[in-house]
Amino acid sequence: MSKYVLTCCSTADMPYEYFRERKIPYVCFHYMLDGREYPDDLGQTISFADFYSRIEAGAMPTTSQVTVGQFIDFFEPYLKEGLDILHITLSSGLSGTYNSAITAREQLLEQYPERKILIVDSLGASSGFGLLVDMLADMRDRGENIDTVYAWAQENKLNVHHWFFSTDLTHYKRGGRISAAAAIMGSLLNICPLLNMSNDGKLIPRKKVRSKKRVIGEMLQKMETHADNGTDYAGKCHISHSACYDDARSVADLVEANFPKLNGPVMINSVGTVIGSHTGPGTVALFFVGDKRKD
């Protein structure tokens, strides 16, 4: 059985320590903030608190995807070590990074035809993308070979549900997720839009909910409806947040109270600097495994 390395993009939004402990290398996206470029390195260069406070002070970061050249530089050392590669990317519905990875793969296989480089489009983002990577790492650690893990990922990635809400619509307006008029009216009426990830990996507004308490209730209902075995769900659950830990903790407490068979406590992570450049502060996202996502 050939040896392989499981890799992903930084936009899986799991803690730095997690990737180190589970031996999952990641390739960094980059972002521009106040005229300077930074790596999306999981809060190592700029803390998440500093990043979001600078946005709240008026900074407007922009992001750049991983290029073909960056993927080649990231992948090649493992190929030289005689390792195959299974790489998971941020959703192609949000970024062109999947295509960059495919192009890098084609170029590298000309030099290393004996190696495997398998690329999975996660069709996910943030710690939902991270939840998929986590399940694949569990399979790797059980001794499953690269082909089995790749096939499972392709078959099951749409079973990872992503539900989001935001109390600050500024950046959703800026990114075209909602109109300027909707953002103004939403703020006036205290509307927190409920969004999810579609089956083609795009972030879609699904419902306008008035008040944070009600939108949290809607998220819990979505989990009850879609999670494997409903409130008997026995899988893992992740939550990510952008500078609103108390809101994330409130959601986690409700999940843990209503889903007593969870596989461990809810993991709460920060929305990273690249995803956070598009959401801004005030976003909470809930991730779990359930039925196939459908539009």
Image: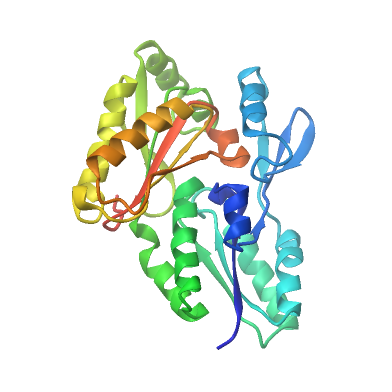
Lateral position of residue 57 relative to residue 126, left or right: right
Q: Which picture quadrant has residue 111?
A: bottom right
In the image, residue 22 lies at what x, y percent? 57, 61
In the image, residue 160 lies at what x, y percent? 37, 55
> 111 above or below 273?
below
**Residue at image x 55%, y 88%?**
1
**Residue at image x 62%, y 33%?**
48
> 267 above or below 149?
above
Q: Please state which of residues 259 and 26 is positioned toward the viewer in this rendering.
A: 259
**Residue at image x 43%, y 18%?**
181
Does residue 198 show up?
Answer: no
Q: Which picture quadrant has residue 142?
A: bottom left
**Residue at image x 25%, y 53%?**
233
In the image, residue 134 lies at what x, y percent? 47, 59
Q: Please state which of residues 49 and 290 is positioned toward the viewer in this rendering.
A: 49
Count of labels in the image: 0
Q: Which colour scheme is used?
A: rainbow
Does residue 163 show up?
Answer: yes
In the image, residue 55 lies at what x, y percent? 63, 24
Residue extending farthest top: 188
